[in-house]
Image (cartoon, rainbow, N blue to C red):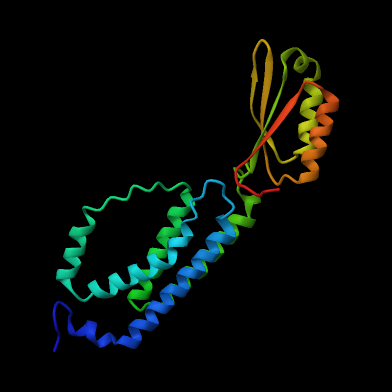
Amino acid sequence: MASGLAGTQMEDIGLMSFLIIMIISLLSSLFVSFLYVRFYEGRSTGSQIHRSFALLAISITAIFICIQFSLPLSLGLLGALSIVRFRTPIKEPEEIGFIMLIVAVSISAATFNLLFLAIILTVAVIALVVMRYGKIIWKGRLNDGMLIVALPASEYALIKKELMALLEKNFPRGRIDSVSESKDESTISYSFANLKKDVLLNFQNELNTLSADASSNFFFNRSGQI
């Protein structure tokens, strides 16, 4: 005999099955957290959202297990969530993808579709590996950071060709984003990829040799890149 709002199907799940599904959901969320740390923790603007993945996964799994056999609970949850507003900003677009991955994994666990869960995680790993190590096939992925070179306008007019040659030699996969010239100063913005420490130091030394008044500033899209 069912009790409360729960149906007989909910009771048929059993305490042990419920515990196993919750553990599977927890282990899956920890694996997703590992993927986040491995591929995106170095982002300087990241919010370290992976710290909430475990609680999110088990909460979502428990909620979907409870409501999938009860229409009143489903309608009540829909009404409750309609008035909830989350004000915490998402600092990185990739974090939205990881949150949706946690939701998909949790729903798969709650509906006992463990094969779907395994497929989702496998495809997610493949996607992350391709995006991380297959940058060559993405023509727009030339922006690991930006170099800003500033020097007096009068001197830039004299060493323009030498400066461009210096940039191309040290950053062969880079590109010029902008060149700004004013009466007193000229500024070059140059995107680069896969910058190494020795290249950075060599460029700074060669730039100082080329122009004693030139200055260089490196900006990286993620921390710990060098």
Residue 72, compared with residue 155, is above or below; it is: below
Residue extending furthest toward the top: 183
User: On the picture, is 95 further left or further right than 69?
Assistant: right
Q: Position of residue 141 (x, y in %)?
A: 61, 45
User: Where 204 sits versus 31, above or below?
Assistant: above
Q: Is residue 178 left or right of residue 212?
A: left
Question: What residue is rendered at 76% in x and 27% in y?
Answer: 164
Report x, y in % for residue 167. Answer: 76, 32
Q: Where 111 sits versus 14, above or below?
A: above
How far across and down, in percent of the image, does residue 149 sit?
A: 70, 27
Residue shown at 68%/44% (left/top)? 193
Picture layout, residue 18 above or below residue 182: below
Work out which quarter of the rendered image holds the N terminus and state it. bottom left
The answer to whether residue 66 is left or right of residue 177 is: left
The picture quadrant where one finds residue 24 is: bottom left
Residue projecting furthest to the right: 209
> 160 and 204: which one is in front?
204
Q: Residue at x 79, y 23 (%)?
A: 161
Looking at the image, the residue that sits furthest to the bottom is 1
Residue 222 location (% of width, % of height): 60, 46
Quarter of the image where one finds residue 157: top right
Query: Does residue 125 appear to the left or right of 73 in the view shown?
Result: right
